[in-house]
Structures are given as structure tokens and as C-alpha cells.
Image (spheres, rainbow, N blue to C red):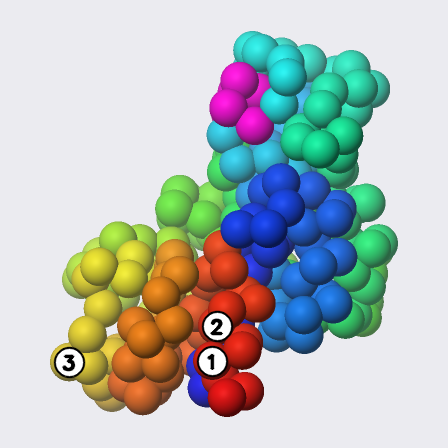
Amino acid sequence: MARIYAHRGASAELPENTLPAFARAVQLGAFGIELDVHLTRDGEPVVIHDDTLDRTTDGSGSVAEIDQVDLGRLDAGGGSRIPTLNQVLDQVGDALHVDIEVKAAAAADAVVAATRKRPSLRFAISSFDHDVLQHVRRQDPDIELWPLTMGASDAALATATGLGSPCLALNDAFVNAEVVDFLRGRDIEAWVWTVNDSVRAQALATMGVTGICTDDPASLLRRSDG
């Protein structure tokens, strides 16, 4: 079975991108978690998907225009708070692999700084903004970088090759056996998001994808164990 990553933690069960959601992923035995990072006004990397607070918290406005101490008072669901990246990394330790998606380019340096403080952390940095990944590569020749992309375009493939990336992070709608084989022929693996159907996940695993990102790791892990 492909490696199972919990998308924003076990977000089918618990509020996305919160400490309980990540703790649940560890409890389930997921191989990894995926999380999203923005930067607060005072320069703290925080784990939240949107650049605004409206959808996932009881606050409103732009993440980038609020200090972390004020952000930390908001309810991100069920009484959970918006965690800082450092809080999440401290919680998971080396229990699983962490896909750190840089949502805001301004957060890239803070993400690199957080990972450098944790030599035992198993992680990759991903982004749809491939300029961000190029920036990170200039800072560190060894960090694992995953270009996020809808499909295996020539541009995405060139980015992955130039960065020395082991995989492309692909939208499930654009993945089939031909794509997986095409990438493997170029020494690049397929990592697929976001898959919540266990039958589809099994089909992807049969194709040979390296990882599957899901909101519902419990269901996919039960299927793989069955």
C-alpha cells in the first residue's frame, strides 16, 4: 500500500490543521501528515490553510494582518486553537513524516528556520509556488522539496528535475497508470492528493504511487489492513 498522509491531520474526524487532528493521525498510524503554513503580522509561522480566518475560525480578516497572540485566542473548531508550526512539530516529533506546504511565500524562511532546529524531523517542503521552492533550494541543497501541481505538466516536471525532487504532488483527477509510469521513467514518484475513497486509493496503490493524501486516514488504513 502507498504511504498514507493525513490531509490537514485527520480532518474528516476533527477540525483541520489543529493539534487534535494531527494527534489523531499519529494515533491511527498514518505514515505522514500534510499541513499548511501562513505567516502572522509579527512573523510567526502558523498552521492554517486559508489566507483569511473566516472559513475555519470564529475570527475574520487576513492572517498576515494579525499578530500570533491574537490569532491564538480564536476558536479553530471544537475549542481548538490555530497552532504555530513549532507547536505542531514539537507535538509530532519524529513519529511521522511531515509535508509542510508553504501557502504564503513570506513564510518560507520561517519554515526553513523551524526545520533546522529539529535535526530528527522527517519532512518535505511543498508549494504550488515553485519560486518558493527555488528560494528554499538556494538556502539549503539538501531539503526535500515537492512541487505541488494539478497534473504532470512539462513545466512541473522540469521544476522537479531542477530541484532534485523525488516526487511530484499531483491532483488525483489527473493521475492514471500512464502518468505514474511516465514519471517513474524519469526517476520521479507520484504523490497524490486528495483521495477519500478507499477503492480509488487501492487502485492508485496498484499503479505504484508513493503516497496518498486523505482527509480520512482511518478509512484508508482500515482498507489497507484488511
Direction from residue 31 to residue 166 in the image, left or right? left
Amino acid type of disc 3? Answer: Glu
The picture quadrant where one finds residue 72 is top right
In the rendered structure, find residue 73 and report the number of the disc placed on it: none
Residue drawn at x 61%, y 74% is 31
Residue 124 visible: no
Amino acid type of disc 2? Answer: Leu
The picture quadrant where one finds residue 69 is top right
Amino acid type of disc 1? Answer: Arg
Among the two numbered marks 3 and 2 on one chain, the one whose residue lies closer to the N terminus = 3
Residue drawn at x 29%, y 81% is 203
Q: Which residue is tagged 1?
A: 223
Q: Are marks 3 and 2 in contact (CB under 8 Å)?
A: no
Return the x and y of residue 181 as percentages of the image width and height: 22, 85
SS for callout 2: helix
Query: Which region shows up in magenta?
Result: 51-56
Is 184 included in the stretch rendered in magenta? no
Q: CA distance from mark 1 to mark 3?
A: 24 Å
Return the x and y of residue 48 as percentages of the image width and height: 60, 35
Q: Are marks 1 and 3 in contact (CB under 8 Å)?
A: no
Direction from residue 123 to residue 179 in the image, left or right? left
Residue 20 vs 43, above or below: the answer is below
Is 52 included in the stretch rendered in magenta? yes
Residue 119 visible: yes
Q: Which residue is tagged 3?
A: 178
Viewer-proximal residue among 37 and 166: 37
Q: Which residue is tagged 2?
A: 220
Return the x and y of residue 37 as percentages of the image width and height: 60, 39
